[in-house]
Image (cartoon, helix red, strand yellow):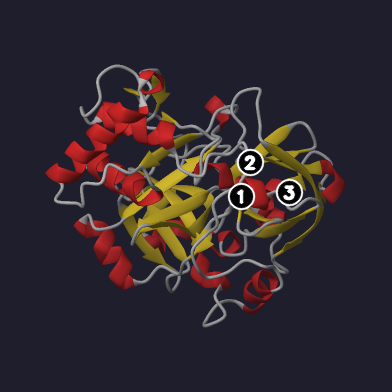
Amino acid sequence: MTKPFADLRAALKTLGFAILLCLAGGQALALDGSIATAGRVEINAMEYPWSAVGRVNTGGRGHCTGFLVSERHVITAAHCLFNPTVGRWRAPIELHFIAGYQRDRFILHSKVASYRRAETFNYADGATIQSALRDWAILTLEKPIGFKAGWLGLKKLDSLMMSRVKAGDALLVQAGYRRDRAHVMTAGWGCAFGGFGRGGRLITHDCNVIKGDSGSPLILFADGGFYAIGLHVIDLRSAQEEPLAGVLSFSLFHPDGGRRDAASALSSTSARWAMGKPPGQGSEAAIVPLRTIDSLLVNLGYLPGRAEQQSQEARVQALKRFQKDRGLPGDGRASLEVLGKLLLAAAR
């Protein structure tokens, strides 16, 4: 996040939460053999669905995460757009969205032409649950870079899908540009639900998030596809002092039961409550995430060596072995659905 907010302790007591003071964590081995921080691993931002997630650069001094939901619309957290130093909202000309950003390379970039935020969000209110429920913004880009970066579909989370996640039939994924690794995209998956708050408008989960992750999507893998189901807006701790991420549920934007201003803002874009769209032909962004798939196959023991050293034939044979072990059709073909199955296996 761009700036610590005010004390949450009193506001969150009724929900069983306490204020988040810091998110500490150890290190883990990344999929590519490098070191990952706090349970997150580096992923290839040049591959879909990760290429639909990008950095929202604010005035050259800070950043948040955002994600494409159409060819030229990005959703992020509203508080990222406020300049607390001078006490005003940033003008669109001060904002840029970069897709596929990995270290010093990026696929696509666009200036922000305009944005729309919750009518009642006030940065000065601080980080209360009530203000978190209004902490959203939709950016309209000057260029339709989503055609080349791809975008995420939208889904409204319900109790049935929550049960499927708990049963291991679906998966939660979080990806963004955390402050301590601001120039690489990292992700965590297999996150557990912490619960719902405020009539289902707020979702909590235990994916590890810190500053910089504000505006990142909570992604759901289900039925062979990846969907955005929420927007990270606030960091919390449970009553047992376990870290939790506070996510604004996309039920807020749904035409059936959502908030009027949020539903109206989203309906005015070309975003759809359906499957997302992978990058178009000729884009530098990969339609099929081969590097991520190879990394997971290495991690699960189906491929020897490092992900970047694998041949297509080795991948095909490894996928056939994986599919056979999981009772799946054994065609050895890499796909987004296979990526999701591998992520599910790696999360167990």
Query: Is residue 72 at least partly visible in the picture?
Result: yes
Viewed as shown, does residue 78 lie left or right of 322?
right
Count of numbered circles on the image = 3
Residue drawn at 58 percent across, 69 percent down: 272
Label 1 and label 3: CA atoms lie apart by 30 Å
Up-down: is 222 above or below 101?
Answer: below
Viewed as shown, does residue 79 lie left or right of 95?
left
Residue 95 on image: x %, y %: 78, 44
The C terminus - image quarter = top left
Viewed as shown, does residue 46 lie left or right of 327?
right
Estimate how packed mark 3 is, as few (under 14), some (14 to 19) or many (20 or more) residues with alpha carbons within 10 Å: many
- The quarter holding residue 179 reads top right
- The quarter holding residue 290 reads top left
Estimate how packed mark 2 is, as few (under 14), some (14 to 19) or many (20 or more) residues with alpha carbons within 10 Å: some
Depth check, front residue: 84 or 226: 226
Residue 346 on image: x %, y %: 26, 38
Residue on which disc 3 sits: 81
Up-down: is 41 above or below 82?
Answer: above
Residue on which disc 1 sits: 280
User: Mark 1 against mark 3, which lies toward the viewer?
Assistant: 1
Query: Mark 3: which amino acid?
Result: Leu
User: Mark 2 against mark 3, which lies toward the viewer?
Assistant: 2
Q: Mark 2 near mark 1, Cβ–Cβ under 8 Å?
A: yes
Element at label 3: helix
Task: Give the numbered dot on residue 323.
Answer: none
Query: Is residue 2 at least partly visible in the picture?
Result: no
